[in-house]
Image (spheres, rainbow, N blue to C red):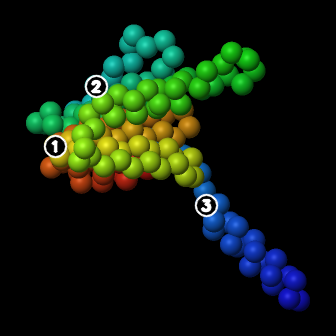
């Protein structure tokens, strides 16, 4: 009886600790959430060979830019296949870090299928987040940081 009870408790602890992987949102969900929050959404997909979708959302004042990228899924049958989302995530981090100052703060998250990098400067707030083959990149002023954080929560990033 004790072994069964310990097994059940152990299983519950393992399930709790491992959590569930986050799911990437669809382009339709991104567009819907952004438009319902008074952002203008433009489709910038043309011109990308390895991206299925690129949406650009901006607020009325153009203080906030949020991009949604859905990359082609990695071809696991090809030895030369690329994980474009991971490559672009790393490139964005390098570009964002160029805005860092001595008073900037950084935050890195990599859990439950979500990778996220945040840079806070005195004047600006930058976020790059990746789930599966999608990226969301946001850039705004420090005064709009909470609004962007709330939007990212709504989007699941």
Q: Residue at x 51, y 41 (%)?
A: 131
Q: Earlier in the sequence, mark 1 or mark 2?
A: 2
Give how far apart the Cα atoms at labels 3 and 2 are.
35 Å
Mark 1 closeness class: few <14, some 14–19, many ≥20 residues within 10 Å: few
Neighbor class of circle 2 (other Cα within 10 Å; few <14, some 14-19, many 20+) is few
Q: CA distance from mark 3 to mark 1?
A: 35 Å
Asked whether residue 37 appears in the rendered view, the answer is: no
Give the quadrant of residue 132. top right
Q: Is residue 151 left or right of residue 93?
A: left
| Residue to which mark 2 is pinned | 42
Single out the mark in the foreground, 3 or 1.
Answer: 1
Tag count: 3
- Element under label 2? strand
Q: Position of residue 61 (x, y in %)?
A: 11, 36
Horizontal and vertical percent for residue 98?
30, 30
Label 3: element kind = loop
Q: Which residue is mark 1?
A: 123
Between marks 3 and 2 in the image, the one whose residue lies nearer the viewer: 3
């Amino acid at each position: 009886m004790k072994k069964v009870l310990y097994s059940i408790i152990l299983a519950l602890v393992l399930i709790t600790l491992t959590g569930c992987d986050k799911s990437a949102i669809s382009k339709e969900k991104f567009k819907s959430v952004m438009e319902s929050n008074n952002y203008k959404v433009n489709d910038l997909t043309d011109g990308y060979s390895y991206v299925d979708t690129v949406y650009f959302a901006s607020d009325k004042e153009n203080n906030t830019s949020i991009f949604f990228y859905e990359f082609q899924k990695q071809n696991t049958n090809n030895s030369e296949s690329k994980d474009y989302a991971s490559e672009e995530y790393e490139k964005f981090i390098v570009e964002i870090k160029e805005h860092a100052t001595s008073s900037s703060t950084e935050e890195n998250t990599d859990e439950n299928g979500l990778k996220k990098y945040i840079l806070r400067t005195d004047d600006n707030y930058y976020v790059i987040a990746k789930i599966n083959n999608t990226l969301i990149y946001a850039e705004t002023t420090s005064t709009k940081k909470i609004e962007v954080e709330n939007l990212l929560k709504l989007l699941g990033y």
